[in-house]
Image (tube, rainbow, N blue to C red):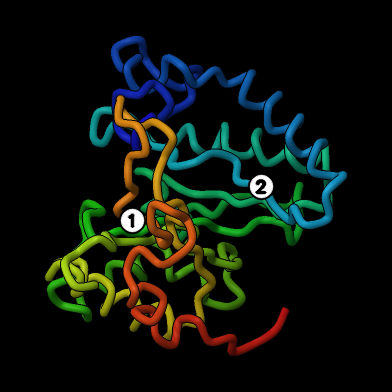
Amino acid sequence: AQWCCDLNDGNGWWDEASSSLFSANSQYFNTQNWIKGLGAMATWAAGYDAVIGMSIRNELREIPVVESGSPWYTYAPKGATAIHTANPDLLIMMGGHLGDTDLSMLRSNPLDRSAWPNKVVWEYHTYSYSVGYDTSDCSVYETEMGAAAGFLLEQNESFTGPLWISEFGFGLNGANGTLSDGDSEYLSCLISYLTGNDADWSWWALQGDYYVRQGTVSSVESYGLLDSTWTDWQNPNGASLLGTMWDMTQGP
């Protein structure tokens, strides 16, 4: 096992939408199996009230420049329909391009969601190393976040919908509970943006270690909230670093 994701793990883009020239990014992403799998999991989830939604796919990613992102409009709805047909109670989480870091295409070309009314939640990932983001200046970073995904919170637009920052995180194993300078800048900008927009979020990741990872037994997860015993914080300041992000400002 290794971290997801890159452009040669064979799971980035639909095989039916890819050229054989780029098989390294799509050879294991069988489109029909993906549709069947989403339907099967949505059916299974019907027996568990705590499961409220499903993502169509983690970090969809075409190869930048050489592959078009337009197949997203053909295939992403197929995944949403598979989920909704099998279990219409579920919310449908939909990320965009480039590893869930770019939903900007929806501003000029909104997705028709009429087949699954009031079910789509837009999904977005952001890390300090995400390509195309400058965290050295928070005003620049917030503008970039707004252009990539934050605009989806604008009211009464054809693209308007809930936005969930379903992945963010940073290294928590620095000396004396500290963060690197880059992660500290990133976190400061992120907190400002998320609290200013009352955003919904999920931290990646919880796990303190792995049974085996890339050949190493009990490999420690540097981004994990928990330590390798899974009984305490990896970084004693980890939870408090998020500050007012923990505050609930409104109910359902």
The number of numbered badges drawn on the structure is 2
Q: Which residue is mark 2?
A: 54
Q: Between residues 187 and 236, which one lies in front from this camera angle?
A: 236
Rendered position, 161 above or below 82: below
Percent of width and height locating residue 62? 35, 33
> What label does residue 91 carry, if any?
none
Which residue is pictured at 35% across the width and 14% down the height?
23
Name the side, left or right, on which 229 lies relative to 37: left
For the residue pair 130 and 119, the one nearer the viewer reads as: 130
Q: Nearer the viewer, residue 107 or 246?
A: 246
Position of residue 13 relative to residue 33, above or below, is below
**The C terminus lies in which quarter of the figure?**
bottom right
Contact between labelled residues 1 and 2, with CB atoms less than 8 Å apart: no
- Label 2 neighbour load within 10 Å: few <14, some 14-19, many 20+: many
Amino acid type, residue under disc 1 in the picture: Tyr
Instruction: Residue at 74% x, 53% y: name it.
Output: 51
Vertical order, 247 against 10 (above or below): below
Residue with the most extreme right position: 47
Q: Is residue 133 visible?
A: yes
Q: In the figure, residue 74 lies in which quadrant? A: top right
Please tell me whether mark 1 sits on a helix, a strand or a loop.
Answer: loop
When asked about the image quadrant of residue 193, the answer is: bottom left
* Sooner in the amino-acid sequence: mark 2 or mark 1: 2
**Which residue lies under the disc numbered 1?**
223
Is residue 108 shown left or right of residue 30?
A: left
